[in-house]
Image (tube, rainbow, N blue to C red):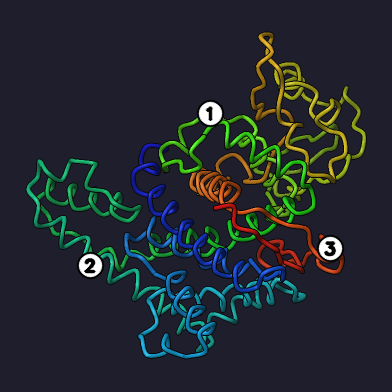
Amino acid sequence: MGVEFLRKAAAPNIYKATLELLDLWRLKATVYKNEAFSVHQDFQNAALDAIWVAMIGEEPGVTRYEIKKFHSEVAGNSDYKNEAPPRGSFLKEELAYIGQTIARNSNTPSPKWAQKLETYTRRYRKFRRTVTTEIGLAMEKAVDRFQRLEMGNLEAEELDTCMMDLVLRRQVLEAKKANCPLTDPREDQSMMDEMFVMLVGGHDSTANALTWFVKFMEAYPVAQVELRAALKAAFPDDDPSVDEIIGTDIPYLDAACEEGFRLAGVAKGNLRQATMDTEILGCRIPKGAQVFMNYHVNRTPAPVDESARTDGSKAAAAKFGGGFQNIAGRDLGTFEPRRWMVKETTGKEVFNSHALPSLSFGGGYRGCPGRKLATMEFRIVVTLLILNLEVLDLAEDLKTMSASEKIFREPDKPYARLRSLR
């Protein structure tokens, strides 16, 4: 998940998936005219296209298929049905199943046992078989390609076109150096599970965060105008390359993305188990206790006795600022990117990532391993979306910010009304 690897292996595919999404939305904006449409599933499709090709190196083609399908429906025919559905359609069906299953079982009196029992069902076995088969086929191709290479060539990192390549190339290299046969990676259940978690968590969480961001752009038009102005100042021709999007310093874009993650609260909280006796704000926490951590801070927290804070906490506050006590902590229920910006002594505005405590991706050893990937994807999609489309005002019944708790926090009304700017 190094930045340079993601630039090379993931960013171009995210960029391509986003351009396909924009093509679909321009078409929908033309056909629907002033009518709103749901954007959540479209974001899910684009995120699946991006995460699968970044992980496995093969394109699912879900959004391209949706474009053909929409064209056919508008023309009043069913030509798209004559084509075999893309590989991504099967993956999409399986991911929808596992998402609904986890959400359902999480709301039972005993979620752990409900999910355990689910693993014995025929439907669950079908899910594991489909995903394992797809990943296994890609693994087989990658291993065959690497085993044909000489030892010296195997050490070249530029051979890695996806996350799976990065791991398998090193395994083949180690096996050749040790002069021993390579263990079949398809039998490595740990690796399969890690890739599965990345696939499920990586595509659904990002799709929900982006859906919330579009709703924020509709609800806070001033922020949308300011963000578009910042992007146009950075990219006068409105057509930035993926390297320019990633590499250009745009403080307001950084601030808007961070504010989107904060207010969306896609992952609302988590549990951590104390590994030793400790204290939190003067409260004794015994070893083994479960501590619930709230990630979605959209209102002013309860006041804290500052004398109860640890020396480390006080030092961090002195270094980074007062957090919720300063101006950045006001009106936490509103979308305000400027809470993440400060002025330097020169008068230049810069992004301050420490303006507020942020746990959108968790933290520590158990923090989200896909944080860099998700942040990069969010930046690319937001940039291209705002430069190419305007998010228009919605009817009152669609403006609601109500949400449902599933694996992630989803908006109940994931609609948008869009106008093409190009």
Label 3: how many Cα within 10 Å (few below 14, some 14–19, many 20+): some
Q: CA distance from mark 2 to mark 1?
A: 40 Å
Q: Which residue is mark 1?
A: 249
Q: Mark 2 or 1, which is nearer the eye?
A: 1
Residue 139: x and y in percent read: 27, 64
Picture coordinates of residue 333, whole percent (x, y): 85, 46
Please state if 12 lies on the left or on the right of 78 as rendered: left
* Residue type of the residue flagged with mark 1: Asp
Residue in view at x 61 percent, y 37 percent: 253
Query: In the image, is residue 226 above or below residue 52?
Result: above
Count how many numbered circles sit on residues in the image: 3
**In the image, residue 165 lies at what x, y percent?**
28, 53
Left or right of 64, for residue 8: left
Residue 291 can be seen in this image: no
Q: Quadrant of the N terminus?
A: top left
Mark 1: secondary structure: loop
Instruction: Note whether 232 is above or below 29 in the view shown.
Output: above
Which amino acid type is shown beneath numbered disc 2? Glu
Q: Say what amino acid the circle numbered 3 marks.
A: Thr
Contact between marks 2 and 1 (CB within 8 A): the answer is no
Q: Does 265 sit above or below residue 65? A: above
Q: Earlier in the sequence, mark 1 or mark 3?
A: 1
Separation of marks 3 and 2 at Cα, in angstroms: 48 Å
Q: Which residue is mark 2?
A: 140
Q: Secondary structure at mark 2?
A: helix
The quadrant in which residue 402 appears is bottom right
Residue name at image x 44 percent, y 36 percent: 244
Q: Closest to the observer: 256 or 265?
A: 256
Q: Which residue is mark 3?
A: 400
The answer, for residue 383, to whether it is visible in the render is yes
Residue nearest the observer in this picture, 196 or 3: 3
